[in-house]
Image: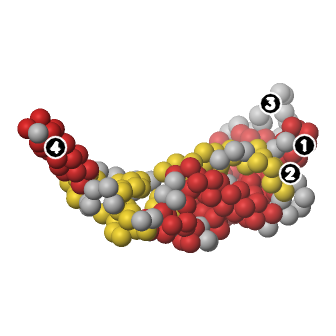
């Protein structure tokens, strides 16, 4: 009998220990803890720490609180102008309503990845099919990411999750038409380059023409100024000469010098003979000097 009592006491102690450990659980910073009782959620613990539940009756399901990444498979999509492209995406998502997440997706990240993959594919197909191939290429980057993310996120609230971002890792062309598209893109870039070159040459010619016009105007202005200065110099010279020879004696002396200069100029070169009228001023000068008889 004593032996039976000892065994019973041991079993009670063991059950108490198991019950204590079964009633305590720990929630981490990056987790939600959904407490289930008879298949229904009775509460959700959102803060980290040591928590208590009813052992053997309540169970705990841990749900990720951090952002999850889902790498979706590459898929073919068709543009509005019926061009085929290959899109390869990855999706970032997080749980925003742990109760809905547990009720609709059984708190399974695998099921959530499947759901976000479908939403991402449909959104990528919808957005790209509404754009031409050139528009898709031009929108690559933040613009295309935003459009696809908004479309993919449309019904995710029903599952208690939010798609934070759907990013296109690569957006390529099928091998059969890649070369043709590249050639067309090269041709377009060459046309743009030729246009820029033509515009540059036209602008350069315009600048040259304007510069030539300014040079002509400046040269004409300089020549005009030079003519004015020459005229002013001659005028000043004549005025000085008039002032210097403003009486008969000085005038006669000036006439004498001018006559000698004229005679000197006429005798330059080889042998020269000068025929003068006897009444001319030069003849009078020569007769007066005794140089002729």
Residue 84, numbered label: 2
- Upstream in sequence: badge 2 or badge 3: 2
Mark 4 or 1: in front is 4
Kindly tell me whether residue 47 is visible in this rendering: yes
Could you tell me which residue is drawn at 81 percent across and 63 percent down?
129
Q: Give the foreground label among 4 and 3.
A: 4
- Residue drawn at x 61%, y 71% as measured from the top left: 155
Q: Earlier in the sequence, mark 4 or mark 3?
A: 4
Q: Residue furthest left?
A: 2
Q: How far is disc 4 from disc 2 in space, using C-alphas?
A: 75 Å
Left or right: where does residue 218 sit relative to residue 159?
right
Q: CA distance from mark 4 to mark 3?
A: 158 Å
Q: Marks 1 and 2: which is nearer the front?
A: 2
- Would you call the spot at circle 2 few (<14 residues within 10 Å), some (14-19), or many (20 or more)? some
The local crowd at label 4, few if under 14, some if 14 to 19, many if 20 or more residues have their Cα within 10 Å, is few
Which of 203/174 is in front?
Answer: 174
x then y, percent, for residue 91: 58, 53
Q: Which residue is mark 3?
A: 269
User: In the rendered view, would you say 258 is above or below 210?
Assistant: above
Report the residue marked by disc 1.
177
Contact between labelled residues 2 and 1, with CB atoms less than 8 Å apart: yes
Q: Which residue is mark 4?
A: 8
């Amino acid at each position: 009998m004593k032996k039976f009592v000892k065994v019973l006491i041991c079993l009670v102690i063991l059950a108490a220990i198991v019950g204590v450990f079964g009633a305590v659980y720990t929630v981490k910073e990056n987790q939600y803890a959904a407490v289930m009782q008879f298949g229904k959620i009775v509460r959700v613990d959102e803060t980290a720490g040591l928590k208590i539940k009813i052992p053997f009756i309540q169970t705990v399901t841990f749900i990720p609180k951090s952002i999850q990444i889902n790498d979706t498979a590459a898929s073919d999509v068709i543009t509005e102008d019926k061009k085929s492209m290959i899109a390869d995406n990855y999706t970032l998502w997080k749980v925003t309503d742990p109760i809905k997440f547990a009720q609709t997706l059984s708190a399974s990240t695998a099921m959530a990845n499947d759901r976000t993959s479908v939403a991402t594919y449909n959104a990528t197909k919808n957005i790209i099919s509404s754009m031409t191939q050139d528009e898709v290429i031009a929108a690559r980057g933040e613009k295309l990411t935003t459009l696809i993310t908004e479309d993919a996120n449309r019904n995710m609230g029903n599952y208690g999750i939010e798609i934070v971002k759907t990013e296109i890792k690569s957006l390529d062309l099928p091998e059969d038409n890649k070369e043709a598209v590249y050639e067309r893109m090269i041709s377009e870039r060459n046309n743009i380059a030729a246009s820029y070159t033509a515009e540059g040459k036209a602008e350069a010619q315009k600048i040259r023409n304007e510069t030539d016009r300014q040079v002509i105007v400046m040269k004409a202005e300089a020549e005009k100024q030079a003519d004015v200065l020459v005229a002013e110099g001659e005028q000043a010279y004549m005025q000085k000469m008039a002032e210097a020879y403003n009486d008969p004696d000085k005038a006669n002396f000036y006439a004498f010098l001018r006559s000698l200069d004229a005679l000197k100029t006429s005798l330059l070169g080889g042998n020269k003979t000068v025929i003068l009228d006897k009444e001319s001023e030069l003849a009078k000068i020569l007769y007066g000097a005794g140089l002729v008889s």
